[in-house]
Image: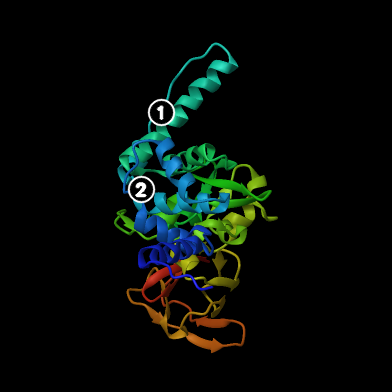
């Protein structure tokens, strides 16, 4: 026996089937697409934000991804707030009172990030955890060091300057950095929107290039603070372009001699250049093509230099100190 569906019902059935492929939420790009196309630009409360995600997404990973995607596309980095951080002073008579006050401060910072749609890493990480808590996703805030600026090559890493998150999915911990997932600061210290999903469930090896936690249990790899400070300086662009340094792996090179830099990359060799800090123009490499990596040969500078920077398509991606 054949059954003829009315057109309206056929549309609804087709719509349900199509949307079920989205609401299965795999791959993660489907989550991003749905959030970008269907979510409001603003939520009035953390609870309403969480309720919206709970109603749309079934599993914890998709919910965690949806939080990441919405925040990274709607909350800008507060450059002004970087130099005007609030200091909370309070007194307490017992441990329970202390915890209650700290919980209230935590909620205030998270809510302020949501309502102002602007935050520094503290606000991003706290809001991300606050929404995860509402959705019963195990989440922690990680404090530690970042390493992205030229000055970091000579910095003493004593006071933490960054915060990110870890989430637990299917009994395994993963790294999340919504702040850097939203964009970056350009040379004029202006925030540039650039959604980077690599910072959701990012690999420990990639995170290690620019993140070092105070609590080393959140490293997930066998590395030390010395390893962190002695590696070349990776700019955020090198991560998004998927370039890995094979050698030299230390931050210091001998610029008196010819230097061979080996990279694992799928990028075009002809778009790589270099410059010492004493040189005004970008220089071309002598390129050696290998099966599994690219070798870029650098000639010594004409004048004594402090830094050597590798560029791709005009953007600095890696810097070494010279001796």
Q: Where is residue 169 in the image (x, y as percent from the top left)?
A: 63, 50
| Secondary structure at numbered mark 2 | loop
On the image, the x and y values in percent for residue 100 come to 52, 21
Q: Is mark 1 on a helix, strand or loop?
A: loop
Q: Earlier in the sequence, mark 2 or mark 1?
A: 2
Residue at position x 36%, y 74% from top? 314
308 or 129, nearer to the observer: 129
Using residue 245 as the reference point, say whether residue 192 is left or right of it: left
Mark yes or no: residue 116 visible. Answer: yes
| Residue 156 seen in the figure | no
Q: Which residue is drawn at 67% across and 46% down?
A: 217
Residue 87 numbered mark, or none = 1
Picture coordinates of residue 213, whole percent (x, y): 59, 46
Task: Single out the residue that lies furthest toward the top.
Answer: 93
Q: Which residue is depicted at the point 45% across and 41% down?
A: 50
Tag 2 residue: 75
Q: How far apart are marks 2 and 1 (CA)?
A: 22 Å
Residue 24, given in percent of the width and then of the height, sits at 53, 59
Residue at the front extreme, as displayed: 1
Q: For the residues carrying marks 2 and 1, which lies nearer the camera in this image?
A: 2
């Amino acid at each position: 026996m054949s059954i003829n569906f009315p057109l309206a019902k056929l549309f609804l059935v087709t719509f349900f089937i199509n949307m079920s492929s989205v609401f299965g939420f795999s791959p993660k790009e489907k989550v991003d697409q749905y959030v970008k196309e269907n979510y409001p630009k603003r939520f009035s409360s953390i609870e309403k934000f969480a309720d919206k995600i709970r109603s749309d997404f079934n599993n914890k990973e998709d919910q965690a991804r949806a939080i990441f995607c919405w925040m990274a596309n709607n909350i800008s980095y507060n450059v002004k707030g970087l130099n005007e951080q609030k200091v909370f002073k309070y007194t307490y008579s017992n441990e329970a009172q202390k915890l209650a006050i700290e919980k209230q401060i935590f909620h205030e910072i998270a809510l302020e990030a949501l309502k102002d749609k602007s935050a520094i890493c503290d606000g991003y990480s706290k809001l991300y955890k606050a929404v995860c808590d509402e959705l019963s996703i195990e989440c922690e805030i990680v404090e530690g060091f970042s390493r992205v600026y030229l000055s970091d090559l000579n910095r003493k890493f004593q006071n933490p300057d960054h915060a990110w998150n870890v989430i637990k999915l299917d009994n395994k911990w993963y790294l999340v950095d919504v702040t850097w997932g939203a964009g970056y600061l350009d040379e004029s210290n202006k925030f540039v929107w650039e959604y980077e999903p690599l910072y959701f469930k990012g690999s420990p090896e990639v995170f290690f290039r620019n993140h070092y936690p105070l609590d080393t249990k959140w490293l997930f790899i066998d590395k030390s603070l010395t390893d962190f400070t002695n590696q070349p300086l990776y700019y955020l662009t090198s991560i998004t372009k998927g370039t890995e340094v094979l050698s030299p792996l230390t931050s210091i090179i001998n610029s008196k001699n010819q230097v061979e830099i080996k990279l694992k990359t799928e990028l075009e060799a002809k778009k790589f250049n270099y410059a010492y800090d004493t040189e005004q123009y970008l220089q071309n490499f002598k390129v050696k093509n290998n099966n599994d990596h690219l070798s870029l040969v650098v000639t010594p500078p004409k004048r004594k230099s402090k830094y050597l920077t590798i560029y791709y398509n005009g953007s600095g991606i890696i810097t070494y100190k010279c001796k």
